[in-house]
Every structure is written in C-alpha cells, then in structure tokens.
Image (spheres, helix red, strand yellow):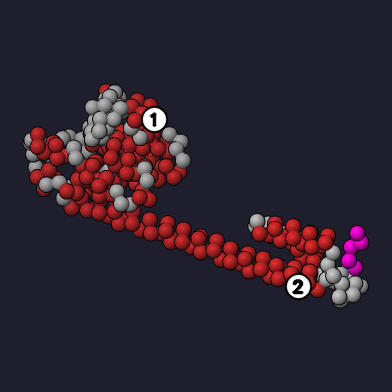
Amino acid sequence: MTAPSENMPADYEASEEEIFKLTEIIEEVAKGDYSNDIMGFTRPGHSDMIQRVAEAMGMMMVRVEARELRLEQLVEELQDLNRLLEKNTTQTVIAIAHALGARDTYTEGHADRVSVYSERLARKMGLPEKEVEKIRVGGVLHDIGKIGFTDRIFSDEDVKFSEKMFEEIKKHPEIGVDILKDLSFLGTVLDYVHYHHESLDGTGYPEGLKGEEIPLGARIISVADCFDAVTTERSYQKGRTMEEAFAILKEISGKLSPELVEAFIEEIQENGML
C-alpha cells in the first residue's frame, strides 16, 4: 500500500494501515510508553482526522508527563520533610534522655559515651552506615526507661539496693520501648533499647534471649555499656583502668559476644578511651 504523501488532497481519507499503526501507538502510550512515534502522524501527508488525533495525543502526553514530574517533585519534597521531622523528633527524644543527667550526672555522660563507643564498634565491624547510625541512636537512648525511676535509685549516696529496687531497675528496657514505641521510624533502634541487657547464655533480661536471638545492635551496645560502667568512677565504685576493664570483658564473654569483645578491645587500643 502506498504511504500518504505531502501532496495528498485535504479530503484524503485515512487508510486502514494508518489507522492500525496509529492505534498501536496509542495503545503503547496508554501503557506508559511515551515515545515520539506518534508525532510522525501530525505532519502533512496524513488525513486531517489522523493529524488531529495525533496532535491531541501529543498534547495529552505532554500534560501527563508534566503532572508526573510535578508528582515526583512533591514526593521528593514530602520525603525531605519527613526526614526533617524524623530528625527533629529524634533530637527531641535524645534531649529528654539527656534530662536524666539532671538526676544523675553519671547517667548523662554514660549515655553519650555508650553511644560513641557503640558507633565506633559498629564501624569496626564494617556495618553499613545506616545501621551504624541506628546503633549510635540506640546507644544514646538505651537507658531512657530509667526516666521513671525513683530519686533514691539516682542518689549519689552509697545506697544499698533492695530486691525491690533491683526489680525496678530491670524494668527500664521495657519502659524505654514503651516510651519510644510510637516513633515507628526508629525501627530496629527499639529492639536495641529493649534487648541491650540480654546475655548470650540466656541469663539476661527482660526476655532471657540467647545467642543469635539477641539483635547485633543490642549486643554491640551491651559491650559498650559494660565497658563504660566499669571504667566510670561512682560513689560506690572506683573506676577500673582500661586494662582491668578489658580483663573483665573477657571474663564475662559467656554473656557478651566474644568476637565483639575482641573487636572492641582492638578499637579502644587503636583510638583510645573517652
């Protein structure tokens, strides 16, 4: 069949072949394939009706693409706003965690140090940057559940803890998760707060998890938490030296992950204590 030429009369009627080809292109457009093939039907040599349909489809494609681009821009803007909101909310929660320092100076410094030690160990283990950040935040927030404790527990005096006080202390991981549970964007941070006092041998709390049942982030924070606890001077405890602390970590490697303890010791030897 002879293709239409530019000199075709104005009353030229479209052939079945033209209509079939144009229909194929329109069907592809409907599927989202915005090729420029349709623009060939807007040129002289096709019937007036074919040109009008092709031009209308071309304009529709332009408008749809413009709207899709705008939607993509709006999605990006919303994602940026969401990230900003998450960041601001996290900073607010961290500020609340630091408020514990008003009741116990050890607790304030402890949270910051555990956060830094945890971040350093996570990097030593070669974890992805996003996971390192979650572990860092988990380190800051790991003791936020203590915010509901009695003032007697926070006392700088040489307090002899009763069984009841110990039971109260052991609730802080669950209290922490309860405080943070509505901040769904924290994701696995909640698990790190919840399980940082679990032990490999199953003797930890609150759920008595064992070995690999304990999330890696929680195990990392546990090592950092223990190290800072034994090296910090308190009213009832003299801070241990770095070497003494290393020995303690090795002694309790049945409760802490041995590979994490070894990596942590190497990291501290390379970069020092806080």
- Camera-side residue: 8 or 265? 8
2 within the magenta span: yes
Look at the numbered discs 2 and 1 and tell me whether their residues touch, using CB distance below 8 Å: no
Of pointers 2 and 1, the one earlier in the residue sequence? 2
Mark 1: which amino acid? Ala
Query: Gap in Å between the C-alphas at discs 2 and 1?
Result: 72 Å
Q: Nearest to the eye among marks 2 and 1: give it.
A: 2
Residue highlighted by disc 2? 52
196 within the magenta span: no
Q: Which quarter of the figure has residue 142?
A: top left
- Camera-side residue: 67 or 115? 67
Give the x, y percent position of residue 37.
77, 61
Q: Which quarter of the figure has residue 92?
A: bottom left
Give the x, y percent position of residue 8.
90, 72
Q: Is residue 204 left or right of residue 83?
A: left
Query: Where 194 falls versus 29 (above or below)?
Result: above
Q: Quadrant of the C terminus?
A: top left
Which residue is painted at 71% across and 61% down in the image?
26
Residue 249, visible in the rendered structure = no
* Residue range (magenta): 1-5
